[in-house]
Image: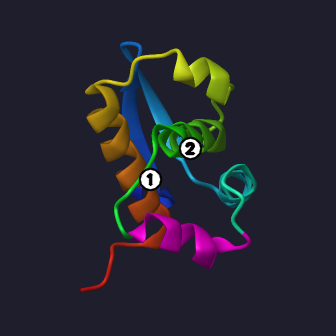
Amino acid sequence: MVNTMRGEVEAKIDGKSYTLCLTLGALAELEAALQSNDLNGLAERFENGRISARDLIAIVGAGLRGAGNAISNDDLAKMNVEGGAAGAAKVAAKLLAAAFGEPHQ
């Protein structure tokens, strides 16, 4: 069971439920993978809602490893996220919202 107070989300990948979390270490990994200088740059990158498949793999992969799952991005790219690309995008959005908070309107 996920702990939303810790920023955890759940995803079904290859038919198995996984807990994901963007810990500080996972965010640092994400900054490096996406060549962002800081957390603000990372947040700004996703604010417009445009995201690549490579971004989805990086976000979901970092979330998996942040929660203790030893799954590389290369392995994740070969796996099936429930709901396909749209499902992966929803998982990524939930992870980013948990890490950075809900967007202010």
Question: Can residue 71 be spotted in the picture?
Answer: no
Q: Quadrant of the N terminus?
A: top left
Q: Residue at x 40, y 17 (%)?
A: 80
Q: Residue at x 41, y 13 (%)?
A: 14
Amino acid type at circle 1 is Leu
Quadrant of the image occupied by residue 104: bottom left
18 or 28: nearer the viewer? 28
Colour mode?
rainbow
Task: Please indicate whether residue 99 sits to the left or right of residue 102 in the image.
Answer: right
What is the x, y in percent for residue 40? 59, 78
User: SS for tag 1?
Assistant: helix
Quadrant of the image occupied by residue 10: top left
- Judge whether 88 appears above or below 41 on screen: above
Q: In terms of sequence position, does the residue under pointer 2 or pointer 1 come before the other? A: 2
User: SS for tag 2?
Assistant: helix
Tag shown at residue 95: 1
Question: Does the residue at mark 2 contact the one at mark 1 (Cβ under 8 Å)?
Answer: yes
Q: Which residue is mark 2?
A: 63
What is the x, y in percent for residue 32? 75, 55
63 or 33: nearer the viewer? 33
Question: Can residue 62 be spotted in the picture?
Answer: yes
How busy is the neighbourhood of tag 2: few (under 14 within 10 Å), some, or many (20 plus)? many
56 or 3: nearer the viewer? 56
75 or 14: nearer the viewer? 75
Q: Residue at x 30, y 24 (%)?
A: 82
Over which residues does the magenta segment extend? 37-47
